[in-house]
Image: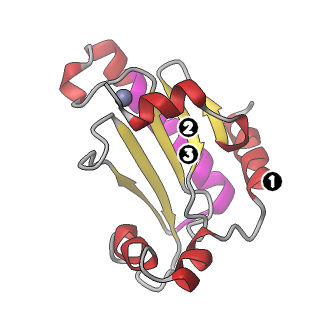
Amino acid sequence: MSCPLCHKIEQYHSHDVVAIFEHSIVFLGPWQYYAGYCIVTAKQHCTELFELSSEVRHALMDEVAQMAKAIHDVVKPRKINYEWLGNQVPHLHWHLFPRQQHDPNHLQAAWLDIAQAEKDVAKKEHLMHCAKGKSQLIQELHRALGM
Ligand SMILES: [Zn+2]
């Protein structure tokens, strides 16, 4: 079995880990135009939420909410988008995109801009840029999580 998220969890590098919860690991997302964008990844390989026991499912959703609250406290977005698709990588994970009023397409899914950026080097650099610096952002998220 070659699941890229199982591999990432086994091989993770501490520089992009934001939090390690009981049932999930949170990575800082590569698209830091959406400052605070994180990916909450289930530690256990699982494709569908209904495959988990009720206890684990509820605990995992609490971890998603806990992370969303920390992101909210740090970057004060207009709205957090919870992107949970799994079409490309069918391992439970949530993309938490903090969306600001000044996002050019703030009413649309972040993926529309990201898909364009994959074909446009300048746009890609713009969307991957982290104004604050990734390590500072991770420190602020740690503080918001009480870590
Ligand atoms: Zn997996």
Q: Residue at coordinates 34% horizontally, 23% vertically from top-left?
A: 45
Answer yes or no: do the residues labelled 2 and 3 have beta carbons within 8 Å? no
The label shown at residue 26 is 2
Is residue 7 in the magenta section?
no
Lower position in the chain sequence, tag 1 or tag 3: 3
Q: CA distance from mark 1 to mark 2?
A: 16 Å
Q: Residue at point 26% right, 13% down? A: 53
Crowding around mark 1 (Cα neighbors within 10 Å: few <14, some 14 to 19, many 20+) is few
Ligand 1 shows up in which quadrant of the image? top left
| Helix, strand or loop status at disc 1 | helix
- Closer to us: 122 or 105: 122
First-in-chain label (1 vs 2): 2
The location of residue 97, given as percent across then percent down, is 47, 59
Quarter of image, res 31: bottom right
Looking at the rendered structure, the secondary structure element under dot 2 is: strand
Which residue is painted at 31% across and 48% down in the image? Answer: 84
Crowd rating for badge 2 (residues with CA inside 10 Å; few <14, some 14–19, many 20+): many
Q: Which residue is mark 3?
A: 69
Viewer-proximal residue, 95 or 63? 95
Question: Is 67 displayed left or right of 55 in the figure?
Answer: right
Q: Which residue is mark 1?
A: 136
Find residue 55 and report its horizontal and vertical position in percent: 33, 13
List the single residue furthest toward the front: 1
Amino acid type at circle 3 is Lys
Stretch in magenta: 59-77
* Tag nearer the camera, 1 or 3: 1
Asked if 70 appears above or below 62 in the picture, the reply is: below
> Mark 1 belongs to which amino acid?
Gln
